[in-house]
Amino acid sequence: MSTPGQAVTGVDTKGHLWIVLSRPTRTGTIAMANLTTHRPRQKTHGAFCVLVEPGEHRFVQHVSCIAYHRATMKAVRPFDSNVRSGRFSAQPPLAPDLLNRIQRGMLTAPRIRKRVVDAVRLTLTSDA
């Protein structure tokens, strides 16, 4: 079952680490975003970017950031099926403090789809 902090590769063809950021919604979807190489001069990696340093997660080999502009909702059933079948490769989950930092960053990042932000906000509220 999909849980916040769960991390997988294989969602895209570029080998990014994708992170589940919300609990499943009533419609059976989860909010997800991926880590990408931090490029400070790139517009989408501006001041709102949450940086993840090597050592904060085993997958991270160089300074990375959350690609909030690519955050999306995924259907839980196919996601879980892809994890079970091995199509998505399970990675170690995020530490709770790192997950919380990423989730809170999403609430302040510009131009994020409202339903993604709402799912993360509801997860944070229900965890309190």
Image (spheres, helix red, strand yellow):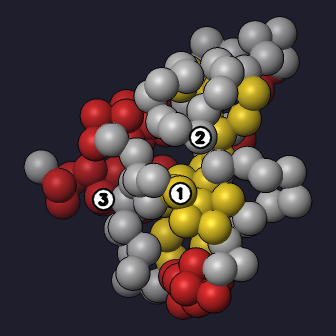
Please state, as top left, top right, bottom left or bottom right, where the N terminus lies in the image. Answer: bottom left
Circle 1: is it few (<14), some (14-19), or many (20+) Cα within 10 Å?
some
Instruction: Locate residue 104, reporting x and y percent.
Output: 38, 35
The answer to whether residue 36 shows anywhere in this view is yes
Residue that badge 2 annotates: 59
Q: Residue at x 53, y 20 (%)?
A: 53
Residue 109 placement: quadrant: top right
- Front in this rendered view, residue 116 or 6: 6
Numbered disc in front, either 3 or 2 = 2
**Sequence-first tag of 3 and 2:** 2
Q: Residue at x 55, y 65 (%)?
A: 90
Numbered disc in front, either 1 or 3 = 1
Query: Is residue 87 toward the left or the right of residue 48 in the image?
Result: right
Up-down relation of residue 11 to residue 17 (above or below): below
Circle 3: is it few (<14), some (14-19), or many (20+) Cα within 10 Å?
few
Residue that badge 3 annotates: 122
